[in-house]
Image: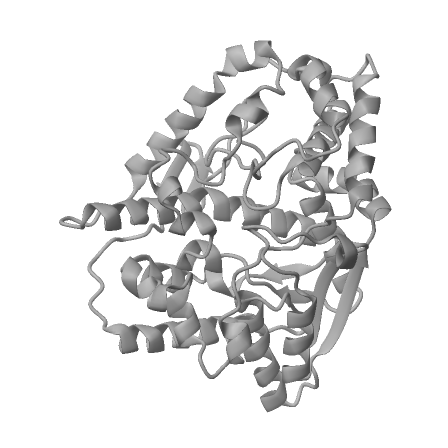
Amino acid sequence: MGPSRTPGHGVFRGVKEVRPGNCLVYDRKGIRISRYWSLASKPHEDDLDTTTEKIRELVVDAIKRQLVADVPVSTFLSGGLDSSAITAVAAEHFRQKGLGNLHTFSVDFEGNDRYFKASEFQPNSDAQWVARMSDHFNTCHHYVNLDTCQQMLALDNAMRARDLPGMADVDSSLYLFCREIKKEATVALSGECADEVFGGYPWFHSQEALTSGSFPWLRSLDQRLRLYSPEVNGRIRPVEYVYQRYQETLAEVPRLPGEEPLEARRREMFYLNINWFMQALLDRKDRMSMLTGLEVRVPFCDHRIVEYVWNIPWVMKTWEGREKGILRRALQGILPDDILFRKKSPYPKTHNPSYQAAVRERVLQILDDRTSPMLPLINTCAVRAIAKLEEDAFDRPWFGQLMTGSQFFGFLIQLDAWLRQYKVVLC
């Protein structure tokens, strides 16, 4: 299930994590864990206009609250709905307070202008939309371009920031991006959580995902399992493990009595995303940014927004049939229309074939190293075979929207480094 982790569990023997919304007290009586916050399901009684105005108020207020700092503040800007909303509110706040031009930052990769390929998950590149936003709101924009060598070298830093193998170059590029932002600012606001809270991901809108009976961001599981050793698959029984964790999570969902079955299923989908996928991305953002000393704040994770949107019915959330439709409606007049209705596109990744070639070559080197502690965990023949292929090993992302063959090889590189550097003993 990596790079996500089971909430409340740990990786090292005898160590567990305190789940979000819980508090641990340790004293002479021992350890006590109590829950201080949870989602509550109840009928949504506001009409469309009231709901729209409420969301607008909550979002603008959350952004303004998180702009408060006694150090330089900036925003991430991809030209998508979420980062653009934050940038628009922040730029207007700066103007009203006489704070000068807001500094904004975007990331791209060497060669993406030539090699970018549109897909279901990345329909277009960000560059033109970044420029549109920066020009419209008169921000002081910084373009950060990363190359293959930088991303490869930073895989190790990203792994150590997590203390675990992670999202490969999706992590390392974020670390490098934050390192550049830190040269100009100490705080940055980012658009994480809007997709989980408002239903922005493609799997929210997929009948296949709704009926799959598993975590919708875990794909190509059968392809991935063929790359692990039979001993590992036999011992951990991954298909059964995923199903067990999935069922445990569904059992936690706060139900609304009398809710229509399809609406109840969508509520389950939101709970899965908030408790698993959102936590994985927040952990990623926090670790990669704090490694550089940059504090990243996420206004869309404001508990007031999460609590209110949780109970908005799906037909209202998807106003006019659009993903995050109610958020788009709430942001009318704040954002230009072309930005407001741009199709969702996730955090960018490199499409440069030089990166794919570099991670393939590094994996082949590890396979040739008989001292690698990773070898007992993988099917070396199968991994070697796909590492020699020209095409992508995965026909669909195996985690989330971005992680395909190149990211799987990067994950293996991080796994090998983690086992070595942390002197991990498997038991």
Quadrant in which the C terminus is drawn: top right
| Location of residue 410 by image quarter | top right
Question: Residue at 58% across / 14% down in the picture?
Answer: 232
Q: Nearer the viewer, residue 9 or 254?
A: 254
- Which residue shows up at 59% across the image and 50% down it? 119
The image position of residue 211, as x and y in percent, is 33, 38
> For the point 70% across and 52% down, which residue is it?
174
Left of 125 or right of it: where is 177? right
Image height check: is 341 above or below 395?
below
Residue at the spot 62% in from the left edge and 51% down from the top edge: 286
Is 35 or 176 nearer to us in this picture? 176
Place of residue 93 in the rendered image (x, y in percent of width and height, measured from the top left): 57, 83
The location of residue 5, given as percent across then percent down, is: 52, 34
Residue 35 visible: no
136 relative to 236 in the view: left or right: right
Question: Which quadrant of the figure has residue 380?
Answer: top right
- Residue 364 location (% of width, % of height): 81, 23
Q: Is residue 382 left or right of residue 326?
A: right
